[in-house]
Amino acid sequence: MVRTMTVICFCIMSGFFLCLGGCSLAPKYLRPAAPVSAQWPKGEAYKARWSGVQPSISWQEFFINPKLRKVVAMALENNRDLRVAALNIEKAIALYQIQRSELFPGIDASGSWSKEHQLISGLPGGAQSPTIKRYSVELGISAWELDIFGRIRSLKEQALEQFFATEQAQRGVQISLVAEVANTWLALAADQEQLKLAQDTLKNRQDAYQLVRRRFELGVSSELDLRQAQMQVEAAKVDVARYTTLVAQDENALNLAVGKSVPPDLLPHDLSETLAAVKEVAPGLPSDVLLRRPDILQAEDILKGANANIGAARADFFPRITLTTNIGLMSEELSRLFKSGSDTWGFVPQVILPIFDAGASSANLRAAKVDRDIALARYEKAIQTAFREVADALAQRGTIDEQAAAQRSLTDAAAATYHLSMSCYEKGIDSYLNVLDAQRSLYAAQQGLIAIRLARLTNLVTLYKVLGGGGPQNSTSSNVSHPDKQ
């Protein structure tokens, strides 16, 4: 009966002291005002006017080309950087749960046996000094800190915000990976088309060289014309070799990003098939972007953690109360250990009051406040960087269509000029020098058109990335799954 009552009192006492905790000395967190304009920049480069909220678009909706969708899905399954980011989340969960466990008493069971010989001189009748044996079994709490001033809770909150920051970092890695795979896939398509253009240009220049050579053999053209035509052939061969290398390097880069070799049937053949590879996106308002960017959410979670750490530093100025208590059984004979009358218990509260620590607690509090200020500056810098990245992408988007239209007109004009120059040369009414100039201009214009078409598509991918990606994962850390539920 005594043993039962002791256990009940022990449990009630532990629960009472557990409920004493909860007072927090951490300053109340208020989200800082964004150090950027409430509207995107305006000017000649920004043709469109954006307002409202851009609906969340998952990468499956954003990428229209079925080949590209499959490649992105392969990357999300096999990329090693993404695996590391996911493992970092698991580590953050474990660290949070370790910190949280300090709020609760750790109950340990122990058993011991001791044998002690006491040397006593002058015993009557020549008696021998006694040998004492003790057997004991105990259940108790060892040095459990009662979190009256919220030190442990503040540290737990800091660990929780670190978990949220790690999860946002994983989201950032995923969004960056999707954009990297898409841009590499598009670059491969562009270089495939550049290679095809170089091969076609080589064939045309070889035909032109044969024409000049026949005219030279007939004495109609000079050797200078022949050598200039030969130079153009060799230059085209250089470009064919260069773009052959670039195509191979693009495939290697794509395989690295995906994490495995991409099947040949999923590789693009030229840029033409990628013109409907991605979907148009609108930025919405700056405030909406700030709720989607994982790097900004990560910076804010780190700021919240630094704010909570101030509470832990403040709690160091107040007493720490620890509790050690146990109940158990003790007997000098093992056979009587579990019989009535062998009960034992202990209750040892301890209070540690800081009096003099040479300024360590004050310095620790100042360091915590400086860490909070550093986190605040980094949070504001993350917002400013995000604003600049989106503004840059919008500036390019506002002019890219005009560039493409002008480049197409330039290419058409260069092609007409080349055909006219070649016709005049064949009729003997123009020099081959004009043909060479027109030939070089046409080739450069065709290369430029491919580059602008690539730039337009990569600009849309960049917009998707800098706007924080899309899909249901776009949320603040308050909506992220809590590690207590995992």
Image (spheres, grey):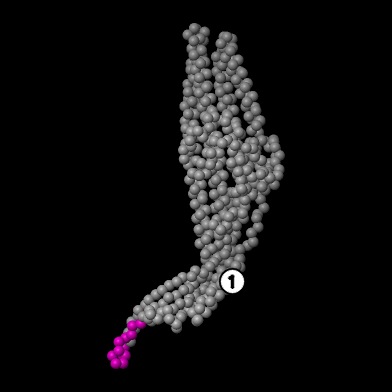
Residue positioned 37% across, 77% down in the render: 114
Image quadrant occupied by the C terminus: bottom right
Q: Is residue 330 above or below residue 289?
A: below
Say whether residue 5 is left or right of residue 398. left
Q: Is residue 234 above or below residue 79?
A: above
In-front residue for pair 437/17: 17
User: Which residue range is magenta in the image?
Assistant: 121-132
Count of numbered circles in the view: 1
Residue receiving disc 1: 20
- Residue placed most toward the observer, 390 or 161: 161
Furthest residue in direction left, as rendered: 126
Extreme bottom residue here? 125
Q: Position of residue 395 (x, y in %)?
A: 65, 37
| Front position in the image: 342 or 284 | 342
Question: Measuring 66% from the left and 50% from the top, which residue is drawn there?
Answer: 34
Percent position of residue 132, x then y: 35, 82
Q: Is residue 49 magenta?
A: no
Who's the residue at 58% across and 69% down the image? 21
Q: Is residue 56 above or below residue 420?
A: below
In the image, residue 106 lies at what x, y percent? Answer: 49, 69
Residue type for callout 1: Leu
Callout 1 crowding tier (Cα within 10 Å): few <14, some 14–19, many ≥20: few
Quadrant in the picture for residue 24: bottom right
Answer whether residue 365 is visible to the viewer in this image.
no
- Can residue 196 be seen here? The reply is yes
Residue 327 location (% of width, % of height): 47, 77
Report the front residue among 431 and 26: 26
Looking at the image, the residue that sits furthest to the top is 218
Q: Is residue 394 left or right of residue 181?
A: right
Does dot 1 land on a helix, a strand or a loop?
Answer: helix
